Image (spheres, rainbow, N blue to C red):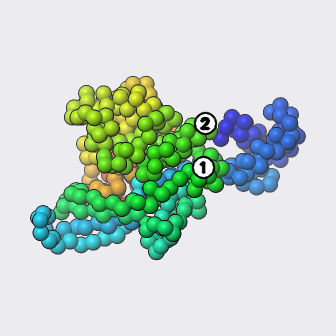
Amino acid sequence: MNNKEKEIVRLIRENPYISQNELADKLQLSRSAVAVYISNMMKKGIILGKAYIIKDSYRIVCIGGATVDRKAMPKNKIVFGTSNQVTYHRFPGGVARNVAENLGRLGCHTSLITCVGNDDQGKWLLDYTRSAGVDVSQSLQLSSYNTGSYTVISDAEGNLLLGLDDLHIYESLTLDLFEKKGNFISSADLLFLDFNYPPDMTAELIRKAHLEGIRVCATVVSSTRTELVPQDLNGVYLLCTNQLEAEVMLEYKIKTEEDISRACKDLKEIKGIKNVIMNLRDKGTYLYTEHGMLHFIEQPTEEKVDWTGNRDAFMAGVIYGLMEELDLVTACEYGSVMSMMNIMDFSTVNPNISLNEVETYHQKYFSK
């Protein structure tokens, strides 16, 4: 919301039956200008109807990938160059979709804007995500491409050996396809982006969100897809990356804590990001803040079944913390708890995650 919209919301909260003439007097605007603001806010979903019903909960919009994840679990140790016995499993996946599902399972008011094929796989993805409490009404279904897929080959301990993705559907995306989503996106309190889409499109989404005063969080999806990260990330409040991705983007090796601090500082200064997270999976997470402070957050682990999707769960925990107005370090603690809970299940997103359990584990591992 812009400043005028925020002021209108404040006045309506004080008096839900305030007239447009009264609003105009208080805001020193014409009545017709107030009417335009009210109309636009109703289109955005900020005002829900007559008598000025204001939405009570914050809203998160996730934009990015949704894929069908296929996981191959070997019966024995993988032997390259020959056939191996595996068991195949299918799960809903995609970074933005995973983050949205995690948030939905925490009870957050979350919407997903993604792109799938007009096929059975795409319908299944959207239906499943909707059942987790996520609004998918703004997602696109395109007839000219198949729904994206991601195939994972793991070792017996659940560690990734090889990942294979088919994401050609995203190459066809243009800003025109998202033009009608503008009002919906601008009503968000927080925007999450993964870098699966063409960089010029992602850059424009960031620019518009920044102008609207919407907090933007983003994740680099893979070291092989860093070319999709826009050069200018001014307007991004928080970027999550890992060691391999940062090495590709910065073109130097990152081994020590000093290297990590330097890399985070360089990403912040070169790309214009406010805060940077370097997620090292089981080794923990480094947070480099806009004030130049480096913090380390441990990664607790209990039962380790499969690591796929752990960083998406981490980001969902961080976003939950931000929406609860926690400081960034504490928000990252919630991210670490979500990551720990996610790897306890073979699914890409643990369907048994609950807010009560998250709070219990946070108390267990991070209470002072």
Residue 144 or 357: which is nearer the viewer?
A: 144
x%, y% of residue 103?
48, 54
Q: Relative to 169, is 264 on the left or the right?
A: left
Residue labelled with disc 2: 211
Q: Residues within 10 Å of mark 2 (few under 14, many from 20)?
A: few
Circle on res. 167:
none
Q: What residue sits 18% from the left and 63% below the top?
A: 156
x%, y% of residue 198?
46, 49
Which residue in the rendered view is the most extreme toward the bottom? 120
Residue 360 or 170: which is nearer the viewer?
A: 170
Q: Relative to 45, is 309 on the left or the right?
A: left
Q: What residue sits 44% from the left and 71% below the top?
A: 121
State whether residue 194 appears in this view. Answer: no
Name the image quarter holding the N terminus.
top right
Q: Amino acid at mark 1?
A: Ile
Sequence-first tag of 2 and 1: 1
Between the C-alphas of marks 2 and 1, the distance is 12 Å
